[in-house]
Amino acid sequence: MPTMTPYTLSVSLLDDTEPGVAFFEDVCAMLQAIAAREGSRMTALQTRGGDQASRTRCATISGQLPAALVRELGIHRAQRLPAGVSVGRILTVRVAVRCFGPDGATARDSAVKTYNYVLRFVSAHDSGERLNLDAVLSGTLLPSGEDRLA
């Protein structure tokens, strides 16, 4: 039986600010939840070489790359207020999700989703839909149309 070359999923924080770190953690947790929901054999997202200050985490995926994870490849943007602030300037931070596999790198340089933490919704750029922020971040949002906002 031939062995399949594993894929490497890479998640990188592009804007190293306090709201960026929190969003980076949210995206990593969301990707782990999506992989678990899809039954994917994905290792935990972790830094390479034990560098906890690193703003890039990688995971190995054995077997097929689930379509649900492929849809997450590209740039994720968040609109957040700094911690402890209820009004003021909204900051935009970005996280890149890329995949490296047998056919080379797979990624998009365009925005996949924008997460509005202030108003609690996510804009999916491919479909134009507005989705529930908590459902998206939990990785439980199903493609069937559940958890969409009007």
Image (tube, rainbow, N blue to C red):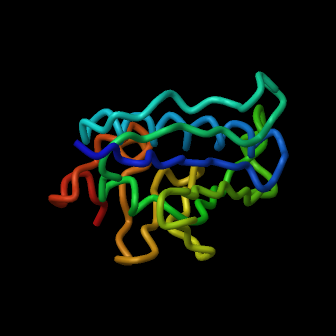
Answer left or right for 103 relative to 84. Answer: left
> Residue at coordinates 28% horizontally, 46% vertically from top-left?
2
Answer left or right for 43 relative to 53. Answer: left
Q: Where is residue 147 in the image (x, y as percent from the top left)?
A: 25, 51
> Residue at coordinates 68% horizontally, 37% vertically from top-left?
22
**Residue with the most extreme left position:** 144
Q: Where is residue 56 in the image (x, y as percent from the top left)?
A: 72, 42
Using the rendered view, name the quadrant where residue 42 is placed.
top left
**Number of numbered callouts drawn:** 0
Up-down: is 67 above or below 46?
A: below
Quadrant showing the N terminus? top left
> Residue at coordinates 35% horizontally, 77% vertically from top-left?
127
Quadrant showing the C terminus? bottom left
Nearer to me, 28 or 135: 28
Answer left or right for 56 relative to 116. Answer: right
Up-down: is 103 above or below 65?
A: below
Nearer to me, 5 or 86: 5
